[in-house]
Amino acid sequence: MAAAEADGAAGTADAAPAQAADRPGAVRDAGARARLAARAAAEEASALGHAPVAPDATASYGDHPDQVIDFYRSGTPAGGARPAPLVVLLHGGAWRAAYDRAHVSPLAAYLAAAGYAVASVEYRRGPAPGSPAAGSDSPDSPAGQAGDTAPAPAGRWPETFDDVAAAMDAVAALAVTALGEEAVDPRRTVLTGHSAGGHLALWAAARHVLPTGSPWRLDAPPPLRGVVALAPIADFGTAIRLHVCSDAVSDLLGAPEHRADRLPHADPSVLLPTGIATTIVHGSTDNVVPPQVSEAFTRAAAAAGEEPTVAWLPETGHFPLIDPAAQAVAAVADEIAQLAW
């Protein structure tokens, strides 16, 4: 696959953060920018070019068609004959309705083959059908790359958050019912997500520190071994400043008059400290969610007294993190293993 060939060696949690010269915004030479764009396009084509993998079971956590979870049964258990840890996977796609869990089903199958029971969560994205903002879901890139003239609106307030909260509350019981208690151990749950799904994973792990009165707030930390956020939209201020995914964060928060009130309920960088083990995996040449977004989150975490593990993957863009054909996925699986076992 093109992305696998272009993908550099995976870094480790001890690797230094991406250097300024590695960042897309810091590339001054036109030839270098063109090469970076070509490699990013090849990575995206590889990651999104796999055929969807059907789950072993699907269960509903609500009445809406998008309120479903796909379950994948573990292959050879990484820890032997014990029930497998549960990996809950939240897909990306800039919270836009055109992008659903199908594009991460190859990653779900990869993780299942590596010894995990996997729960791939669907949730409502984009505006409600028939609303003035709905428009059409033209096939814009999930990245919202420059050149997209009219990206579909992103996110759905409050339904996107309603769904993720409800799915997380239900997933353990649904996994046992779908796969059997001999096949899955929800006491060893790791939450992971990519891009917009990485945001939702960080958010779901922080529900116990949501503002008092939030409908999604938990009284105690969620029962997680930890979170592995893949190129997450983790700091809304930085993402808004950089117009990440064609201003998807602004769409998610809704009309400008609502944003100040909604940020404290939605931005992972202000929902700190969580006390939940957190790992960030981010490619140094990501031109979709630039490394600066994760760096801003880690600074906010440090200021709150926490130190997330950060695995910077050199010469790696946005999509290899979910591409079973790319070397980066081995680093993702390793970070999940550090928490699951």
Image (cartoon, rainbow, N blue to C red):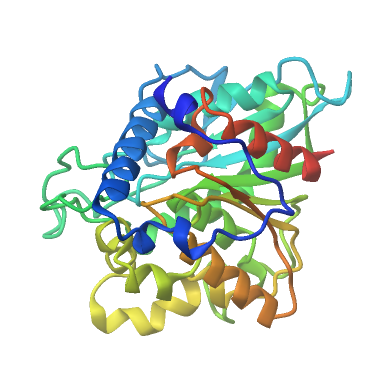
| In this picture, residue 290 sits left or right of residue 142 | right
Residue 228 spot, x, y in % from top left: 64, 49
| In this picture, residue 331 sits left or right of residue 95 | right
Is residue 10 shown above or below 229? above
Is residue 74 shown above or below 44? above
Residue 61 spot, x, y in % from top left: 52, 41
Residue drawn at point x = 76 percent, y = 53 percent: 223
Name the quadrant of the C terminus: top right
Residue 250's quadrant in the figure? bottom left
Q: What number of labels is visible?
A: 0
Residue 152 spot, x, y in % from top left: 19, 50
| In this picture, residue 329 sits left or right of residue 262 | right
Is residue 300 shown above or below 216? below
Residue 31 in view, yes or no: yes
Name the quadrant of the N terminus: top left
Between 234 and 126, which is closer to the camera in this rendering? 234
